Image: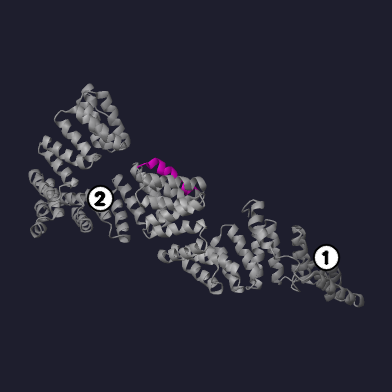
Amino acid sequence: MKILPGAAILCLITIMLLSGCITGDNGQGGPTDPEATVRESLRVNDAILAREPGNVTAWVQKGTLHQRLGEYDSADAAYDEALDLDPGLSIVWLYKGNLRHVQRQYPEALLMYDTGIQADPDNPLLWGYRGRVLVALERYAEALQSFDRALALDPMHSFAARDKGDLLMAAGRHGDALAAYTLALAADPGNTELALVKANLEKNLMRYPEALATYDSVLARDPGNQTARTGKADTLAGMGRYGEAVALYDDLITESPDTANLYAIRAYALNSLGKYEDGLASAEQAIAIDPTNSIAWNNKGSALSAMGLLPEALEAYNATVRIDPGNPVAWSNKGYVLASMGSYEAALDAYDTALDLYPGLTGTWGYRASALLQLGRYEEAITAADTELRLNPAHAGALVSRGDALTGLKQYSEAATAYRAALAINPSSGTTWFSLGYVLHMAKDYNGAVAAYGKALDIIPNHSQAWMYQVSALTSLGRSGDAVRYYDRAIRDNPNNTIALMNKAYALHQVKQYHDAIRLFDRVLAIEPDNTAAMLNKAFDQIAVGDHLGALRTYDQVLAIEPDNTEALIYKSAALYRINRFEEALDLTERAISLNPESSEVWANKGFVLTSMGRIDQAVATFDRALALDPRNNDAKQGRLAAIRIMWPAYRGP
């Protein structure tokens, strides 16, 4: 059972096991006795042996006294005299083994312990020390067997349980290690150092209630124990008791104001309370004390990300992974920020690094699925979402991503199943209700779609797409009149109810009553002059009725408020295109592309403009770019075909 290279294991385990444990102390006085006292005891014992050379007990005592003086050869000779008189003295074989063990003569020590076990196979001490020397020899499986045998003979054998726990920890078997430490602590309940080892492991395994109880047991004996207080603060943060954690961190910081880690983890608790500016300040205080504190940099990134300062957050996460490249959480956080910035390929690279470091990192597979969705890699997104769900079956986001990927593959029934599972976990998600409505709509389950859209609108009353699709579903059921009248009562009760006015306008649009829709959008704008959603929908309906100049004026209003509104740029370009102002239309598409270079729709729009300008080769290349971004873009497919047929009328595809 090779766990780690020998030198590393000796550092992790052997030194820990041997430190202060195998010193020649055989239970008959401490090694700290003044040498003069030990020598006087030795003189008295020698006098006894002069009179009674067959006194086995005196020979054993002589050996232990020499052993405490570090006179190992003399001790060994005395033990041999005792064994000559009684070869079956198993305890003496134990002492001889300890002599060799402390001198790092591990094979010889093992032989001594084994000889003792032959004489007394039920001696738990021999099995326990045998386990220790097997650890030193890197024979870990055999060591575990020895510790288990010692504990079977004496369940309260504290050091065997502790040593077993240390060995299991080094092997990565943390749950089994915790069980061993629990047994060791039951045998030695006053051992503060052992209790802290157990509590720290419970905390790291996220068994927070148990960790809290163990830390409290230490603090009941030693109220000022800083390790226990810090561990308790970390545990409270892990339990979501952030206010209590911050209060305890504040006390600890008062006592140790130059401890960077206290500020760093305090930042996490503050971020979790939504106090991002305070969290940022705490992280920066930690960094001022220790610029290489990766926890502080990570929590600084979290605060900046939550504050919407994404480039700054990315810098913080980059600093984290420079300092601690093996931190999977930091890589995952970096990926999330990159995805939020639209850099999905780079986000995937960061997620993959995180998962290479720790394949079981919950949440990251779900984030990876979301990034793959944005790139149109639906099968891979499903695989990533399924991996997340195996790790965390209650991850609603992964279920939604699975549903979105299945929707992209037009597997609507399976998508509906995924959305319903997500809603069972989080029934208050309006966007998921809309997604469920959409796939039911596509599957021609119009009644189910209407009900789902209704749920979405109950949660997000101004969800314009939900209302438009609900109108479409009602129309498919022959209930277009119901759709238009749906909000009449709300408008009668409150003529300034802009949500109801907007939704009725959407309904009128769906039934092609564009002029009436425009009038309602104008009513909304009289109440809310800066409502760009109303402007965009009004302009779209103006194009539908052929009022292209009016649409241009409306799009200009939008752009005066939001100069980088991509939708306004695209559709203003379309309006210009329809009145043959191609150069202006092309300029707008170029600007839209500079703002959103990954938009297939924008590239397709540019292709149509170039076709109308007679620049066919450029148009085809532009449509190709649109299809590379989204192979399902039917407008781009048709535009490409039409452009090629201008040069080659008989062309049929692909």
Residue where numbered disc 2 is placed: 439
The one of 475 and 296 positioned closer to us in this rendering: 296
The amino acid beneath tag 1 is Asp
How far apart marks 1 and 2 lie (CA) works out to 83 Å
The amino acid beneath tag 2 is Val
The one of 635 and 321 positioned closer to us in this rendering: 321
Measuring from the top left, give residue 303's x and y in whole percent. Answer: 39, 53
* Magenta part of the chain: 342-356
State the SS at label 1: helix
Question: Is residue 624 in view?
Answer: yes
**For residue 642: magenta?**
no
The one of 83 and 569 positioned closer to us in this rendering: 569
Residue where numbered disc 1 is placed: 76
Q: Residue at x 43, y 67 (%)?
A: 244
Quadrant location of residue 553?
top left
Question: Is residue 360 in view?
Answer: no
